[in-house]
Amino acid sequence: MKNLVVFASGSGSNFQSIIDAISEERLDAKIVGFVSNNEFAHSIKRAQENDIPVLIVSPSDFPSEKDYTSKLVNQLHSWKADVLILAGYLKKIPSDIIAAYRNNILNIHPSLLPKYGGKGYYGIKVHEAVITNNDFESGCTVHIVTDEYDEGPVLGQSIVKVLPTDTASDLAKKVLEKEHELFPSVIKKHLLTQNK
């Protein structure tokens, strides 16, 4: 069984979908830790309610990027993390951690990458761009994290139709539902490939 560490900055509904998949035995893994850069994130409460150890840490808490990275690396090692899961995490993962967990950091993004990916494209901003450009479809993507935002290999996508009447918030709700289905299933497939 692989040890997961989940990173989130917000409400953590994708985090919850992973917790649920494990408790319902749809995903054979253990969440050994949770990291957030936002001390007010609702996702922290989700971790506490499920007895998952929490680390609240932000680059601004440290005198240098090196000190921040060192704190994160030490915590991940102490948790014996195998795979890192970014479930709405709004800070860039340091290069040293990407190197240490190469091909084992998964992120979910609320668009059909490579469309609407990269710095500045997150949350409602993605959905607003889709609506502004009159796209007929959108969706979500799970991909491997590399040093460039949203450019790593795609592991899975799920598509939703964009209706002419949809607002950005309508689209956000539809895409989020798909995210909750897609993320646990892609994590499961990824873990199976790691066990071979």
Image (cartoon, rainbow, N blue to C red):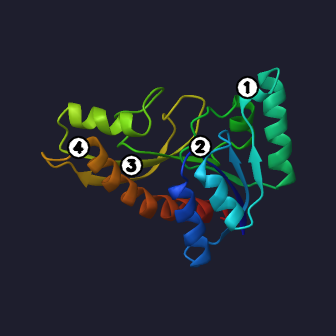
> To which quarter of the image does residue 50 belong?
bottom right
Would residue 114 be seen by someone viewing this image from the given angle? no
- Residue 14 point in image, percent of width and height: 51, 57
Identify the residue position indicated by label 1 in the image: 60
The answer to whether marks 1 and 3 mark residues whose Cβ atoms lie closer than 8 Å is no
Which of the two residues, 103 or 184, is positioned nearer the viewer here?
A: 184
Q: Nearer the viewer, mark 1 or mark 3?
A: 1
Disc 3 residue crowd, few under 14, some 14–19, many 20+, Cα 10 Å? many
The picture places residue 34, in percent across and down from the top left corner, at 70, 53
Of the image marks 4 and 1, the number of the one nearer the N terminus:
1
> Relative to residue 76, is residue 125 depicted above or below?
above
The residue carrying pointer 2 sits among few (fewer than 14), some (14 to 19) or many (20 or more) residues within 10 Å by Cα, namely: many
Report which residue position mark 4 lands on. 167
Looking at marks 4 and 2 on the same chain, the residue that comes earlier in the sequence is marked by: 2
For mark 4, does the 10 Å Cα neighbourhood hold few (<14), some (14 to 19), or many (20 or more) residues? some
Report helix, strand or loop for mark 3.
Answer: strand
Residue at (37% x, 33% y) in the render: 125
Q: Amino acid at mark 2?
A: Ser
Tell me the quarter of the image containing the C terminus: bottom right
Quarter of image, res 179: bottom left
Instruction: Check disc 2 and report the residue beneath it.
Output: 9
The span from disc 1 to disc 3 (Cα, nearest Å) is 30 Å
Residue 49 falls left or right of residue 110:
right
Write down the residue under mark 3.
140
Q: Please state if 65 lies on the left or on the right of 43 as rendered.
A: right
| Residue occupying the point 30% across, 46% down | 169
